[in-house]
Image: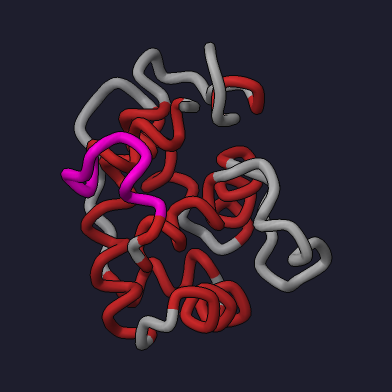
Amino acid sequence: MGLLDDVIGAALGSKPGSGASSPIAMALMALLASRMAPGSAGQRGTFGGLGGLLEQFRQNGFEQAMNSWIGTGQNQAISPSQLHQALGRDTVDDLAQQTGLPHDDLLSQLSRILPGVVDKMTPNGQLPSDADLLPGPR
């Protein structure tokens, strides 16, 4: 199991490998995995992993929040409306469609969970390699 699976499972309090079926785990995987699910290449909102998500936050004026999650200091909070701005409408629409969650529920849950997940994925203040995120033996 890859780092991403481990971190999401821990953040959601699920057993390793069992959290990927929850809607919020699906949203986290879509945001943080290097590639989205097969057949979704070219869809709006495809980031290209944590680095792509950082770039999206940077473009929308929320780089400081993301940098606080990646760094080794205190994680800056992000409200659901700020997260909506940081991700952009198209991405939020795509995530809501993929997960079946209403926008408000999706953003509320992600705004609470995403900072900690990014923090755990970057324990030394550095982005993990794509290989570290893939499932399978490490």
For residue 70, side relative to residue 40 (left or right): left
Asked if residue 92 lies in the magenta stretch, the reply is: no
Q: Is residue 15 depicted above or below 86 in this figure?
A: above
Residue at the image point whose x is 53% and y is 83% from the top: 97
How is the protein colored in the picture?
secondary structure
Which residue is situated farthest in the left direction here? 13
Q: Is residue 103 left or right of residue 77?
A: right
Q: Answer whether residue 19 is magenta in the image.
A: yes
- Say if 98 sits above or below 63 in the image: below
In percent of the image, x 39 and y 59: which residue is there? 21
Left or right: 18 in relation to 34: left
Residue 114 image position (x, y, % from top left): 33, 51
Closer to the camera in the image, 57 or 6: 6
The image position of residue 111, as x and y in percent, is: 28, 62
Determine whether 115 is above or below 130 in the image.
Answer: below
- Look at 27% across and 80% down and name the residue there: 105
Work out whether residue 125 or residue 103 is closer to the camera in this orientation and state it. 103
Q: Which residues are magenta?
A: 11-20
Q: Picture quarter containing residue 13?
A: top left
The quadrant holding residue 106 is bottom left
Judged left or right of residue 29, residue 65 is left
Q: Nearer the viewer, residue 13 or 112?
A: 13
Q: Residue at x 25, y 66 (%)?
A: 109
Task: Pinpoint residue 32: horizontal percent, then vertical percent.
Answer: 53, 46
Question: Nearest the camera: 31 or 12?
Answer: 12
Tally of numbered discs: 0
Q: Main secondary structure of the magenta part?
A: loop
Q: Position of residue 83 (x, y in %)?
A: 39, 67
